[in-house]
């Protein structure tokens, strides 16, 4: 393989070193954490006091775990179940199976849901856009079921898709029995873990960032239009962090008597995107305080490094059997990586690689190489290099012209 190697030196001061009772980076501890004294609570080591039964902090770009406490313990998730419901709704929108303007009718079953609701009546219709508002802002159980039925025909079929998606995302400590988290229990088979909640949160916020257009709304209202007439119904967000935390992007709260108080909080600052999950906190204020503390911890230990694709100079490459001898190319996208702990950008190595033989015909956009980024011996990104022009295969006329040109050059020399 033809190999062009460029090593870039990126100067940056090492990030502050904080201590965590269980900090993991790609399966290993990212920071040189000192062992705590026997009397010191493990969660206090990071400067973060976690009273909740389980918690996890992940960096969304790579999915690395920055902080964990009982991350795989199977617990009752309550309404943070709806993160998966919203993920499947946005997936259906992306695949054009539904649109935001579609009208969704409320069934008797959907209207019968208790707990958090917007009091949809049987036969009442709302747009998909309004239903997403109700789920995201007010954590509406009735709207969640109505959308599950609309997307999959029944809640039962929708829940099957939820579990399939969970398996696809590697959520090995999760089982869903309903789409809203109402009346869930470990015994019934409805459970999840802090890490699994983080996985589905990461998928939702990174793949469909437009969820933030709903999840960061503090107050809104919907219009009920039924046989009884028209009335307004106010929506107030259950996630108090959207009013107080800088960079918050979502995402979802949950609470029942069995689940206690849960929260998946997502935030982004200066290109660093994080998800903090709190499960089974003792009271509602504690879940917000602990999530904010974890996010603060992540932002103090992580920074984003990026390189524009337009700044990477790619030399023209030889092409075989083309009407031209060389082909021009460009890097497909920008490079972005979140450095955490003692990782330093000056340790990033960049390798530019091309196919051993580039043969015509080549169309603009065809992949002919890649830019590989390596940190501490591990590949952290691989960005395609694509042809920036069409190169047709040479024919007899092209070869004759080339031969004639060489003869003329030989005679003139």
Image (spheres, rainbow, N blue to C red):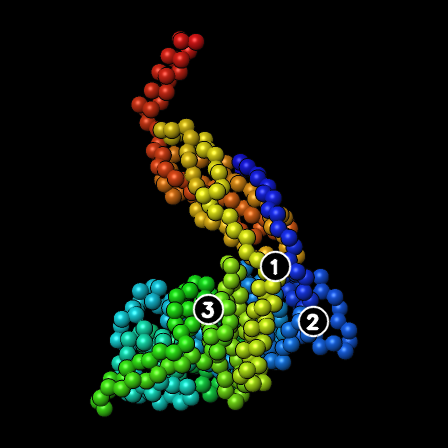
Q: Quadrant of the C terminus?
A: top left
Q: For the residue carrying disc 3, how many other residues have a C-alpha within 10 Å: few (<14), some (14-19), or many (20+)?
A: many
To which residue does mark 2 refer?
45
Q: Secondary structure at mark 2?
A: helix
Q: Secondary structure at mark 3?
A: strand
Q: Is residue 6 above or below residue 225?
A: above
Q: Secondary structure at mark 1?
A: strand
Which quadrant holds residue 292?
bottom right
User: Which circle's residue, 3 or 1, is located before the other in the chain?
Assistant: 3
Q: Is residue 171 above or below residue 374?
A: below
To which residue does mark 1 refer?
340
Toward the viewer: 256 or 177? Answer: 256
Residue 269 in view here: yes
Label 1 vs label 2: CA separation?
Answer: 17 Å
Residue 159 in view here: no
Left or right: residue 284 versus residue 211 is right
Residue in the image at 40% along x and 13% along y: 409
Numbered marks: total: 3
Task: Find residue 202 and report its horizontal and vertical position in percent.
Answer: 49, 66
Label 2 vs label 3: CA separation?
Answer: 27 Å
Left or right: residue 286 versus residue 104 is right
To which residue does mark 3 refer?
249
Q: Is residue 42 above or below residue 373?
A: below
Verify CB contact (< 8 Å) between mark 1 and mark 2. Answer: no
Residue in the image at 33% along x and 20% along y: 401
Q: For the residue carrying disc 1, how many other residues have a C-alpha within 10 Å: few (<14), some (14-19), or many (20+)?
A: many
Label 3 vs label 1: CA separation?
Answer: 21 Å
Give the label on residue 188, or none. none
């Amino acid at each position: 393989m033809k190999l062009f190697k460029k090593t870039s030196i990126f100067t940056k001061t090492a990030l502050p070193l904080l201590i965590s009772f269980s900090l993991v980076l790609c399966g290993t501890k990212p920071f040189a954490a000192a062992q705590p004294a026997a009397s010191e609570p493990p969660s206090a080591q990071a400067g973060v006091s976690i009273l909740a039964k389980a918690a996890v902090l992940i960096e969304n770009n790579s999915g690395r775990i920055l902080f964990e406490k009982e991350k795989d313990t199977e617990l009752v998730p309550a309404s943070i179940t709806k993160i998966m419901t919203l993920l499947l709704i946005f997936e259906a929108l992306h695949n054009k199976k539904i649109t935001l303007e579609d009208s969704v009718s409320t069934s008797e079953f959907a209207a019968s849901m208790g707990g958090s609701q917007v009091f949809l009546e049987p036969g009442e219709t709302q747009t998909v856009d309004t239903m997403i508002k109700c789920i995201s802002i007010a954590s509406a159980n009735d709207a969640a079921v109505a959308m599950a039925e609309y997307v999959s025909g029944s809640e039962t079929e929708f829940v099957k898709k939820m579990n399939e998606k969970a398996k696809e995302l590697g959520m090995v400590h999760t089982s869903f029995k309903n789409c809203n988290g109402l009346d869930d229990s470990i015994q019934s088979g409805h459970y999840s873990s802090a890490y699994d909640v983080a996985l589905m949160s990461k998928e939702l916020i990174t793949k469909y960032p437009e969820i933030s257009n709903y999840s960061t709304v503090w107050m809104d209202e919907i219009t009920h239009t039924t046989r009884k007439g028209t009335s307004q119904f106010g929506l107030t967000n259950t996630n108090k962090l959207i009013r107080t935390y800088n960079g918050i992007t979502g995402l979802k709260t949950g609470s029942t008597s069995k689940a206690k108080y849960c929260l998946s909080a997502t935030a982004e600052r200066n290109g660093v995107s994080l998800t903090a999950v709190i499960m089974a906190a003792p009271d509602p204020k504690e879940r917000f305080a602990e999530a904010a503390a974890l996010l603060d911890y992540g932002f103090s230990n992580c920074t984003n490094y990026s390189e524009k694709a337009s700044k990477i100079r790619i030399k023209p490459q030889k092409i075989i059997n083309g009407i031209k001898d060389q082909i021009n190319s460009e890097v497909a996208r920008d490079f972005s990586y979140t450095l955490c702990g003692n990782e330093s950008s000056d340790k990033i190595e960049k390798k530019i690689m091309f196919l051993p033989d580039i043969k015509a015909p080549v169309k603009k956009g065809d992949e002919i190489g890649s830019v590989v980024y390596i940190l501490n011996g591990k590949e952290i990104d691989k960005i395609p290099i694509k042809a920036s022009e069409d190169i047709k295969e040479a024919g007899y006329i092209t070869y004759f012209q080339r031969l004639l040109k060489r003869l003329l050059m030989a005679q003139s020399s």
